[in-house]
Amino acid sequence: MDKSEAEDILIQVSVDSRLQEGYQGVRLIMREIFRGGMVPIHDISRATGIPVPAVSATRRELEKRKLLSRKGGAILTDTGIKLLRSIGIYDTKIPDFNCQYEVSDTVTKLVSQFDELTKERPSPDYSLDQSHATSLTCFKRVMYCHQNDSIEGRDIAILGDDDLTSVAMILFSTRFGLKINSLTVFDIDERILNFIESMSLKLNFEIHLNKIDFIGEIPTRYKNSQDVFITDPPYTVEGLTRFISVGAEMLKERTNGLGFVSYSNLIPVENARLFKNIASMGLSPQELIPAFNEYVGAQKHAGISKMGKFFSSGYLKTSDPTPRNLIYTNFKETSI
């Protein structure tokens, strides 16, 4: 069974069970059963955030297709396991990380390795609103993605990566045997792209690097190509809107997708405007975590920012290309 065939099956399961979370929800339910083994339905519901009746309906459709059976709880059949493996999910033994409150010794060691590898990284370009996240923050982002089934078998795009979240993701996925389908970084700063390329060669990990300026239209080949996008955009509402819009354009229409957005506090009227813009793109906020990200020496916004998780509804209306002087704080303040 190839990846496309497996996706077709899960999409049809979501249609037949009327699961509002679609393909992503079915995948999440099966992943939880695969990792847990003989899982009671209420535990699946709690772990996935999907209501019990919806989990029950999905389970019935999976049983009809002989992808799982019930033996004191839900358990995948050999066919179900083969299906998950075809979309990149394996029975990987990995700790159950709580990225908000605790950090294991294993992750602490990865942070130290990251610091050693990246000590010659490029300095921030403040004209592009660059401000390095702490090394631990980069790993918290990766752990949060993993908690939300957004690494294994996924096509992942990082929009702007002066934080080097891609390097943290390479270290983390390599350490725990997680198979990323593809990892692509988009950035306007050639220094960042060159440095990430040197890291990927050192770590023997294939990564795709693209120089792109988000103020204009993105090339068609990048649209409808990714399962996940990750971004820490410029501070302005216009900058946030433009970067998130580009991420939304990149998400696959067939299987929807997830966006992970780091952004600082906004005044209420700006926050309302931002979420109105996000809703118009067909993105639905699933979770907002305050003070998730910490930054090195960033005083403009108290050195912290939120983490937002957004789910694609499949409906897409992107923002128009935006002038540079509206996207970046430095340009905006200079022009006032």
Image (cartoon, rainbow, N blue to C red):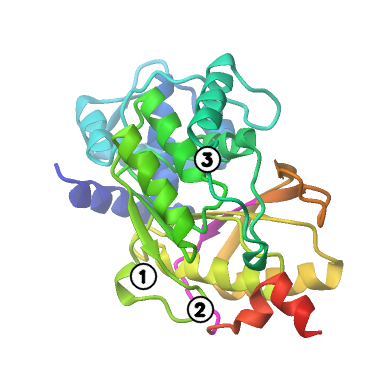
Q: Which structural element holds mark 1? A: loop
Task: Kindly identify the amino acid type of the residue bearing the numbered disc 2.
Answer: Lys
Residue for badge 3: 120
Nearer-the-camera pick, 333 or 231: 333
Side of 81 where 145 appears, left or right: right
Alpha-carbon span between mark 3 and mark 2: 40 Å
Of the image marks 3 and 2, the number of the one nearer the N terminus = 3
Q: Position of residue 279 (x, y in %)?
A: 62, 70
Image side of residue 163 versus residue 146, left or right = right
Q: Residue at x 52, y 28 (%)?
A: 116
Q: In the rendered image, which quarter is residue 81 located in?
A: top left
The count of marks equals 3
Q: CA distance from mark 2 to mark 1?
A: 13 Å
Could you tell me how far apart the alpha carbons at marks 3 and 1 are, in whole angstroms?
33 Å
Q: Which residue is mark 1?
A: 223
Q: The disc labelled 3 sits on which kind of residue?
A: Glu
Point out residue 22 in the picture as x, y percentages from the top left corner: 42, 54
- Check disc 2 and report its element: helix, strand or loop: loop
The verdict on residue 311 being magenta is yes
Residue 310: % across, % down: 57, 56
Q: Is residue 34 visible?
A: no
Over which residues does the magenta segment extend? 308-320
| Disc number for residue 317 | 2
Q: Nearer the viewer, mark 3 or mark 1?
A: 3
Secondary structure predominantly adopted by residues drawn in magenta: loop
